[in-house]
Amino acid sequence: MEKRESLSPEQQAELRVKKMSLELDLNANQQAEIKKMVLENAKKREAKKAEWKKNKEAGKTLTKDEKFAMKNQMLDQQIAHKAEMKKILTPEQFAKWEAKKSERKGKMHDRKGSKGKNQKERK
């Protein structure tokens, strides 16, 4: 299977902001603020991916405490992201953003569930 080319953090941020602009009708100031935030998050995500890859190649597994710390940090980042979005968006836009986020989460959950069913059926 061919490995896909991944987008740079800047490209990811640009596309994400444009999608959000279409979904939420963002003004220019909102676009700029969100782009800055999304770009920062994309760069952090790339750094984490590089760290995970390095650990995987070294055969390092995480301890329970390391897993807890990682999950705790991820949730803290999600809370901070939500608070930032609430500051940038109007109440109507924020409600729509939350609804879209829930919709995406539901679709992802459905995909994971269907994969699990297929794997169980094969056994």
Image (tube, rainbow, N blue to C red):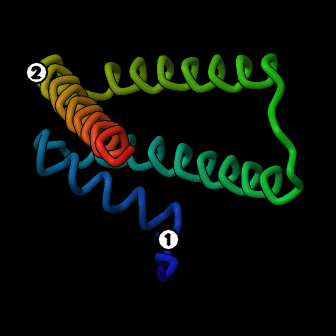
Q: How many marks?
A: 2
Q: Locate residue 40 relative to residue 88 in the image: left or right.
A: right
Note whether 36 is above or below 66 in the view shown: below
Residue 99 image point, x, y percent? 16, 25
Q: Residues within 10 Å of mark 1 (few under 14, many from 20)?
A: few
* Image quarter in which the C terminus is found: top left
* Mark 1 vs 2: CB contact within 8 A: no
Q: Residue at x 24, y 57 (%)?
A: 18
Any mark on residue 6, and which? Answer: 1
Residue that sits furthest to the front in the current view: 123
The earlier-in-sequence mark between 1 and 2 is 1
Viewer-closest of 44 and 37: 44
Q: Is residue 47 above or below residue 4?
A: above
| Label 1 element class | loop
**What residue is disc 2 on?**
92
- Identified by mark 2, the residue type is Glu
Residue depicted at 86% across the width and 51% down the height:
59
Q: Residue at x 48, y 17 (%)?
A: 79
Percent across and percent down for residue 57 are 82, 59
